[in-house]
Amino acid sequence: MTAPRSRFATLRLALAAALAALALAGCLPIEKPDAALDVPSQYRAAKGAPGGAPSRVAWWRSFGSAELTRIMEAVETDNFDIGAAVYRIQQADAQARIAGAALLPTLDASSDASRGRQSGLDRRSLNVALSASYEIDFWGKNRATQIAAERLAAASRFDRDTVALSTLASTATTYFDILGAQDRLKIARESLASATRVLDLIKQRVTVGTGTSLDQAQQETVVAQLRAAIPPLEQQIEQNKATLAVLLGRAPERIAIRGGGTAGVKLPRINPGLPSELLARRPDVGSAEEQLAAASADVTVARAQFFPSIRLTAQGGYESAALSSLFGPGAGFYTLAAGLAQPIFQGGRLEGQLDQARGRESELLEIYRKAVISAFADVERALVAVRQLAGQEELQAQAVESSRRAYQISEQRLREGTVDIVTVLNTQSSLFGSQDSLAQVRLARLQAIVALYQALGGGWDLAPRGGRL
């Protein structure tokens, strides 16, 4: 028994030495392409950096609406799209574990029993064995495959953040749509009441002979138009509530939205920070970067396919014709083997795979660059909208105040009989239109602030999210 053991020990030492030498050898590097980003030093539309900036965490709280906060928190946990994105993360993590399995040896156990008769003799065989196999990752192919899967898993997390950010922004926008429609509905009803009051005055003048049927018909037209404007606004409110229910993951009959108009909503102050910090906050930019990194690892995998692969296999166990002697001293056996496979002619398949991987990497590089530039443009557009709409709301409020004074004067003079119906019609039309425009401008301003939150990756807290290219 000494000689076989000595030979086995020698072989084992030789294999260990070979493994150590291969482990110390280098592998193909993962080369990242230069993104060559042109990052501006500041946003063109940003004017100063006032304090009081809200946090990226629960950014919707800065609007000061308890109902909006309740809705947004429910969307975070109950929205179907966000839930689906979470399960995509689970799939990506599982794929990363699958890819990493190639870096470890495989171990299998087997057993079999057979019985037969040949030349008048009974033959039986019992076998119990344990086999192991391991591919030496000399060129880093398996490691690069795992890295690619891990980067895709990281990208899936950024994708989840992108879905969540988009969903929450849509929720806030839809909620503000309801508030804006409620404002306009209130204005329409007040305008209808005012126009009806004027119609009653004109009817009184017609009765006493100081008014004409034409005056009455003209005012009746105004009243009818204001009545016709109310149902579309009520429809808009109900339809937006149904949209909000889907975002909440509930049937429309299961939600209750009070709203109450935009007057109770605060307008947060704006502090967008620096453009360079945007790259650490935008989840879509993070996803594009991780996908680019995964593609770079895939290029390494494709390059490694040109080189030989080395596989070690081992098997050991017991074999006997009788169960009683299966695990006896003479029943044991083992085999050790090492194999090397070098591609010689593949008909252009390996070259095609490498070109495909490089093309995919170049494509994702362009997508990453576009994601960065688009992020800057999104912020600029939102900043311009917020600033311009703030000025527009101020001017529109002045127009409403002037129109209200003119209408009050014209209504008073109508009572006194010193003004014609044309003047009254003009002033009331101006007031009703100005009030409705003011409600729409305020709604647009709230939506622009939500768009800015989304463009900035969910607010403007400058905490970094991790390294970038």
Image (tube, rainbow, N blue to C red):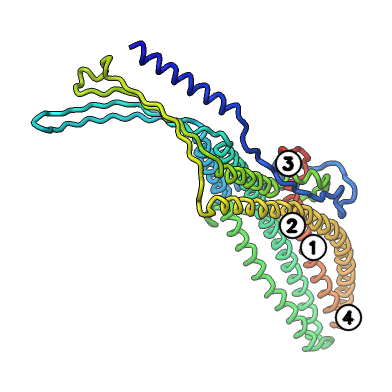
Q: Which secondary structure lies at badge 4?
A: loop
How far is the residue under mark 3 from the one under mark 2? Answer: 30 Å
Per the image, the residue denoted by label 1 is 441
Label 4 sits on what residue type?
Gly
Q: Which amino acid does label 2 sit on?
A: Gln
Q: Do the residues labelled 1 and 2 touch (CB within 8 Å)?
A: no
The quadrant holding residue 336 is top left
| Front residue (pair 339, 319) | 339
Give SS at disc 2: helix
In this orientation, which residue lies closer to the viewer: 202 or 351? Answer: 351
Residue under pointer 4: 417
Reading the chain from its start, which is encountered first: label 4 or label 2? Answer: 4
Q: Distance between the residues labelled 1 and 2?
A: 10 Å
Residue neighbourhood size for the residue with mark 2, other residues' Cα within 10 Å, grouped as few (<14), some (14–19), many (≥20):
many
Q: Which residue is drawn at 62% across and 42% down?
A: 151
Q: Rounded to the nearest whole Å, what is the CA distance between mark 4 and mark 1?
A: 36 Å
For marks 4 and 3, give the CA distance: 75 Å
CB of mark 3 within 8 Å of CB of mark 1? Answer: no
Q: Which of 469 and 119 is in front in this view?
A: 119
Residue 307, percent from left and from top: 56, 41
**Residue 447 point in image, percent of width and height:** 74, 57
- The residue under the point 66% across, 57% down is 174
Q: Dot 3: within a 10 Å radius of its alpha carbon, few (fewer than 14), some, or many (20 or more) residues?
A: few
Q: Residue 447 carries which label?
A: 2
Q: Which of marks 3 and 1 is in front?
A: 3
